[in-house]
């Protein structure tokens, strides 16, 4: 997801413009200061909560939380760097390249197959059939 709580940057800009139009410059600045205070308080509360949890768990719990945090960060990095669609397309390209490289190597001692003689196209029964399927006929035989 992009942005905060699934709200992208364009939606945030639209919300900010609406707030500016509705509240005017004085009220918008006041609201922004209040929002900043609330965000600061939330961050302080979260940091205090995490500090309490770490102190309750002790050194082993702190180590476990650090490992969990690192794993979460690694998973987030992996999610950002690789998309399933990209992985599938790269895998398909690798399989195609592998199939092209292995096809001749799989049968190096087999003699080349003789090409079957070219089959002549069937002669049309009547003029209607010849004009109806003209696009299917070789270029030299079109009427």
Image (spheres, rainbow, N blue to C red):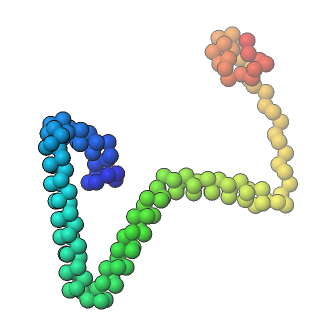
Task: Please tell me whether residue 5 is drawn above or below residue 142 in the rendered image.
Answer: below
Which residue is rendered at x = 57% and y = 57% of the image?
91
Q: Position of residue 48 (x, y in %)?
A: 20, 75
Which residue is rendered at x = 32% and y = 46% of the image?
9
Q: Position of residue 143 (x, y in %)?
A: 73, 12
Q: Position of residue 124 (x, y in %)?
A: 71, 17
Which residue is rendered at x = 81% and y = 33% of the image?
118
Is 50 positioned to the left or the right of 27 in the image? right
Is 88 positioned to the left or the right of 61 in the image? right
Is 64 positioned to the left or the right of 54 in the image? right
In the image shown, does 48 or 124 lie closer to the viewer? 48
Task: Please tell me whether residue 112 is drawn above or below residue 76 in the rendered image.
Answer: above
Q: Image quarter for residue 100?
A: bottom right
Q: Which residue reaches farthest bottom?
A: 59
Q: Image quarter for residue 18?
A: top left
Task: Please tell me whether residue 69 is drawn above or below residue 29 in the rendered image.
Answer: below
Q: Image quarter for residue 141?
A: top right
In the image shown, does 23 or 142 lie closer to the viewer? 23
Which residue is rendered at x = 78% and y = 60% of the image?
105
Is 62 positioned to the left or the right of 81 in the image? left
Give the mark count.
0
Q: Which residue reaches farthest top?
A: 127
Q: Position of residue 8 (x, y in %)?
A: 31, 47
């Amino acid at each position: 997801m992009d942005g905060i709580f699934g709200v992208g940057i364009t939606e945030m800009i639209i919300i900010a413009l609406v707030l500016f139009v509705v509240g005017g410059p004085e009220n918008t600045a006041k609201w922004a200061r209040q929002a900043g205070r609330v965000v600061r308080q939330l961050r302080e509360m979260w940091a205090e909560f995490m500090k309490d949890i770490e102190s309750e768990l002790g050194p082993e719990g702190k180590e476990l939380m650090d490992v969990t945090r690192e794993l979460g960060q690694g998973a987030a990095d992996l999610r950002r760097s690789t998309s399933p669609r990209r992985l599938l397309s790269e895998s398909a390209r690798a399989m195609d390249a592998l199939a092209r490289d292995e096809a001749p190597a799989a049968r190096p001692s087999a003699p080349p197959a003789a090409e079957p003689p070219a089959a002549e196209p069937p002669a049309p029964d009547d003029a209607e059939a010849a004009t109806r399927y003209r696009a299917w006929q070789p270029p030299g035989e079109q009427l």
